Amino acid sequence: MQFVAEYSTGYKIPMEPAVTMGGSGKVPNPIDYLVAALGGCTSIKMILDISTKGFKVDSFTMKIDGTKSKTPPGIFEKLHLVITLSGDLDDSAVAEVIKDTITHTCPVAAMFRKTMEITWEHHIID
């Protein structure tokens, strides 16, 4: 049971049910794409805004952990983002950009925040 979402631009995105619903685990399920969209949207916005402030990001990773409700439909109740960066960065400027991105400027985060809590932490490494 695999599906393909095809957009007018020609992009095709494969998807299947979660493994618990019969999926193979080889193709993302719709919820995987939602969480990936949050990570992608916030990451792009953060890197752009940090760069606009005159800082240089050499590396950027984000890990997203979540807790889901135990009852159907099993929606996320909370997501926690762990952001790790390196480069010529100022901790307070990075913290400000991250908070602004998650609470104001990322439309995907804005949609998620209507139904769940989003928390975050960041680490700047050498």
Image (cartoon, rainbow, N blue to C red):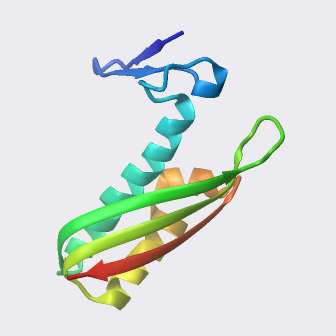
Q: Is residue 18 visible?
A: no
Q: Position of residue 49 (x, y in %)?
A: 29, 70
Question: From the viewer's perspective, is 88 left or right of 122?
Answer: left
Q: Position of residue 86 (x, y in %)?
A: 22, 76
Q: Position of residue 34 (x, y in %)?
A: 52, 40
Q: Position of residue 16 (x, y in %)?
A: 51, 20
User: Against 56, is 10 above or below?
Assistant: above
Q: Is residue 95 visible?
A: yes
The image quadrant that residue 89 belongs to is bottom left
Which quadrant of the figure contains the C terminus? Answer: bottom left
The image quadrant that residue 1 belongs to is top right
Which residue is found at the position 34% from the left and 66% from the top?
A: 46
Task: Looking at the picture, tell me which residue is in the foreground, 108 or 85.
Answer: 85
Which residue is found at the position 37% from the left and 79% from the top?
A: 123
User: Against 32, is 50 above or below?
Assistant: below
Question: From the viewer's perspective, is 109 left or right of 54?
Answer: right
Count of all numbered marks drawn on residues in the image? 0
Which residue is found at the position 45% from the left and 68% from the top?
A: 82
Task: Looking at the picture, tell me which residue is in the foreground, 86 or 34.
Answer: 86
Which residue is found at the position 48% from the left and 76% from the top?
A: 121
